[in-house]
Image (spheres, rainbow, N blue to C red):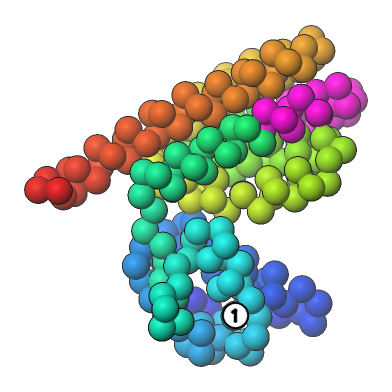
Amino acid sequence: MNLSPIQTRRSGLAEQVYQAICEHIIEGRLVPEERLREAQTAAALGVSRTPVREAFARLERQNLLRKEASGAYYVRQWDQKTLWEVATLRSVLEGLAMRLACNHFSAADYAALDEVIAQMDAAHARGDDDRLIALDIDFHSLLWAKTGHSLLQQALEEMKAQILYFMLITRPGDERDYPSSHRELVEIMKAGNAEKASQTIQEHIHTTAVRAVARWEQKRKNANPAG
């Protein structure tokens, strides 16, 4: 079992177990169609079966695991439909988040966004695409936190694992464009044009998704020339 014991705390154990399994999936250490057994997973993590059961159920809701009629869980193999559903849902939610958040940013908030972009520049310079992806999520999380809409923020936070998994299975992507595209977005925000900022972020996610799904489809065809 490709899992290691976690440092458990009495509070938030189910969340810790979820995060441990989720990280292994989105980083590719647990591969599509690999079976996860409740007892084996619990033993590997050094926890009881109850938080593992809760984590499995949550990962199933996020389309990261699938459950068969027998009760067996497997890492889900995504298809083109799932990729499009994740991308289009994210686009709509991010557009709304931007529209709500745009006029709530303070000078300190913009400084935080600028710092993330500066870190993107550094990651780009050293060719660190993994870091660029992590910084992309950091950037968008700062936006989500300013919406004043708790249910929207919760929905986006719950999508975070799906977004990261999308990026994993469609790589290499547009990571090297992140500094410039995010800097452009911040400039629009600073101009106070919430509608343009909303439109820009939706178009960026859509365009990126079109290219990503095309890459994924080509890789699938190359791996299965007869199919």
At 62% from the left and 24% from the top, the residue drawn is: 201
| Vertical side of 215 occupied by 76: above or below | below
Where residue 182 appears, x then y in whole percent? 63, 23
Task: Decide if residue 128 is in sight here.
Answer: no
Front residue of 180 and 65: 65
Considering depth in this image, is 160 or 119 the residue closer to the camera?
Answer: 160
Q: Horizontal placement of 108 versus 44: left or right? A: right
| 56 to the left or right of 78 | right
State the image quarter where residue 1 is shown.
bottom left
Residue highlighted by disc 1: 52
> What residue type is disc 1 on?
Val
The residue depicted at 80 percent of the width and 23 percent of the height is: 102
Is residue 218 toward the left or the right of residue 15 in the image? left
Examine the image and state in which quarter residue 81 appears. top left
**Residue 153 appears in the rendering:** yes
Relative height, residue 184 to residue 101 (above, below): above
- The span shown in magenta is 94-115
- The reply to whether the magenta stretch includes residue 99 is yes
Residue at screen point 49% across, 42% down: 85
In the rendered image of this protein, does residue 202 appear above or below residue 50? Answer: above
Taking depth in this image into account, of 203 and 43 the one nearest to the observer is: 203
Magenta residue check for 101 = yes
- The extreme left residue here reads 226
Residue 217 in picture, x, y percent from top left: 28, 39
